[in-house]
């Protein structure tokens, strides 16, 4: 058994995110001092990064062991080795949980709507699929209308 203390620079360095596990046993979590941590399965530090306005969000790890994390203003993707693969400014993300479907589409809450994003695996950057978002909005609005609700 082991324990790891996520010491930041201040006194409020509590861990509020849930840990997530990669296929190789790497454990990823964040603390309230805006650090994203990766630990080896034996509890030793693998890497850590300071991410402005990270907050209390829990990371998401996909089947290729890419680590996705959202801050208040950015969506970031790291390799399991801690290398930044890409980042994108998406205002209004907050610290809502991320979700990914089996096709690799990433879903994020952005202020008052859900945005569907297809990460581009071969280059730095990402493609925000406006068409996918519009299709998602159309499907949700039709469902709400059929239930007697509103799409706003």
Image: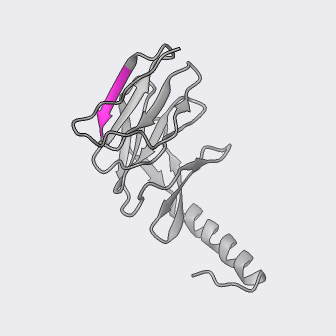
Q: Viewed as shown, does residue 123 lie left or right of 100?
A: left
| Magenta-span inclusion, residue 49 | yes
Report the label total.
0
Q: Which region is colored magenta?
A: 46-50
Q: Residue at x 49, y 72 (%)?
A: 112
Could one spot residue 124 in this view of the protein? no
Closer-to-camera residue (90/71):
71
Above or below, 140 against 99 in this view is below
Q: Position of residue 43 (x, y in %)?
A: 45, 17
In the picture, which quadrant includes the C terminus?
bottom right
Is 21 rendered above or below residue 74?
Answer: above
Name the outermost residue toward the front.
11
Whether residue 41 is situated above or below residue 116 in the rendered picture: above
Query: Can you give x and y, in whole percent of width and height, for residue 9 in the image?
Result: 22, 36
- Whole-percent x, y for residue 93 in the image: 42, 59
Q: On the rendered structure, is 15 left or right of 21?
A: left
> Residue at 66% of width from left, 44% of height from top?
103
Question: Compared to 79, does 137 lie above or below?
Answer: below
Q: Is residue 128 inside the magenta stretch?
A: no
Q: Is residue 84 visible?
A: yes
Classified by dominant secondary structure, the portion drawn in magenta counts as strand
Q: Residue 78 occupies which quadrant of the picture?
A: top left
């Amino acid at each position: 058994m082991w324990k790891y203390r996520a010491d930041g620079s201040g006194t409020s360095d509590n861990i509020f995110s849930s840990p997530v596990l990669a296929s190789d046993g790497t454990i990823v979590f964040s603390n309230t001092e805006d650090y994203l941590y990766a630990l080896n399965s034996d509890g030793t530090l693998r890497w850590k990064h300071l991410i402005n306005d990270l907050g209390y969000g829990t990371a998401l790890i996909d089947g290729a062991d890419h680590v996705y994390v959202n801050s208040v203003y950015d969506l970031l993707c790291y390799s399991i080795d801690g290398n930044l693969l890409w980042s994108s400014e998406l205002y209004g993300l907050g610290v809502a949980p991320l979700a990914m479907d089996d096709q690799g589409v990433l879903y994020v809450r952005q202020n008052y709507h859900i945005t569907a994003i297809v990460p581009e695996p071969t280059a730095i950057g990402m493609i925000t699929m406006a068409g996918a978002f519009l299709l998602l909005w159309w499907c949700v609005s039709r469902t709400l209308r059929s239930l007697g609700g509103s799409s706003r």
